[in-house]
Image (spheres, rainbow, N blue to C red):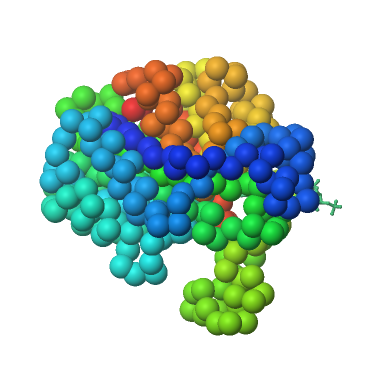
Amino acid sequence: MGVKVVGTGSYIPEKVLTNIDLQNMVDTSDEWIRVRTGIVERHIAPPEMSSGDMASIAAARALEMAGIAASEISAIVVATTTPDHVFPNTAALVQKSIGAENAFGFDLSAACSGMIYSLELAYSLLARKKYRYVLLCGAEKLSAITNWKDRNTCVLFGDGAGAVILGRTDDDESGQLASDLHTNGSYSDILKLPAGGSRQPASHETVEQGLHYISMQGKETFKLAVNAMTSACKNVLAEAQIDVSQVKLVIPHQANKRIIEAVAQRIDVKEEQLFVNVHKYGNTSAASVSICLDEAFREGRITKGDIVLLVAFGAGLTWGAQLIRV
Ligand code: COA
């Protein structure tokens, strides 16, 4: 028995916010953003649209590709740092929206590593005969938690959603070849949303101080990201005893082109093996890896049986890699 990717989908909001637009909002320049991050534009969801709405559209597209009914889904995991509500979970809203009446669902909070963690769950669930298909969504409306007056962060993020459906198959070849997941809470302060949780509930003061926006130490995060992602990639390749040349595509979390290139260089990945779309969408946190996976399938850069290396790093700190045969 194996587990394969049977369908993927994504949703990117229509509205584009370019670097030029940002020049008119904060003290920045198109050149600074391009050179330091590789980002050219990002997409912003309309006010009435939530992460759950975007996840539902991505999920419907994944169901269409899979050619299965929503009622066949056993479980839904929504990885997000911008859930529609603290409760109910966003997965419940997706379940209703797509009509997956037989699925149980929950949200997963691991920031930008959300899809890497979700895949671990999906492969574990599908090892049991009880479950046939698992729907994973990564969805973010980061524009809702971005301080549009802070040039250190507002140029980096964007909105969007991706969805991946994994299913049990008789083909033994497909499945998880290796995984490497980590958390290090010692660095929890370098990237966080300070207020709005039980430690610092929302109040007039927290709103006045802008504590409901992303707070980040960029330089520190950059260095930690490169080292952690490199080591996770090396660990999964070693565990599976696979040479990087056998990997069809490396899909890294899309935070910064320089981070991606630094990791690629350290694990010796060729340009044609590397998936990059950060220039179009910026950092979409938990959504980024699943959006990439969907684009990679639809652009024909990967197909059934290929080995794919997915790797991410995010707040927590959380990080990890998945080496899978799709
Ligand atoms: N436009 C112009 N100048 C800006 C700017 C902007 N949008 N944002 C910051 N700056 C300025 C800062 O004020 C600072 O100026 P100072 O030196 O006078 O204080 C300087 O640029 C910062 O430069 P530096 O620290 O060398 O930038 P950098 O090369 O580290 O790039 C980031 C900054 C944020 C792009 C980079 O650190 C990064 O991408 N970090 C990781 C972010 C990330 O991935 N987060 C999510 C993790 S999943």
> Residue 165 in the image: x percent, y percent?
28, 38
Query: Is 283 rendered above or below residue 262?
Result: below
- The structure residue drawn at horizontal position 33% and vertical position 41%, both measured from the top left corner, is 58
- The structure residue drawn at horizontal position 62% and vertical position 28%, both measured from the top left corner, is 264
Please give left or right for residue 123 compared with residue 261 in the image. left
- Residue 264 vs residue 22, the one in the foreground: 22
- The structure residue drawn at horizontal position 31% and vertical position 67%, both measured from the top left corner, is 88
> Residue 134 in the image: x percent, y percent?
25, 44
Please state the total of marks drawn on the protein image: 0
> Residue 108 in the image: x percent, y percent?
39, 57
Query: Is 240 rendered above or below residue 182?
Result: above
| Residue that protrudes farthest toward the bottom in the picture | 204
Query: Is 103 rendered above or below residue 4?
Result: below
Can you see residue 115? no
Please give left or right for residue 122 compared with residue 216 in the image. left
Position of the N terminus, as image quadrant, is top left
Position of the C terminus, as image quadrant, is top left
Query: Is 205 rendered above or below residue 183?
Result: below
- The structure residue drawn at horizontal position 17% and vertical position 50%, both measured from the top left corner, is 99
> Residue 233 in the image: x percent, y percent?
54, 35
- Residue 35 vs residue 260, the one in the foreground: 35
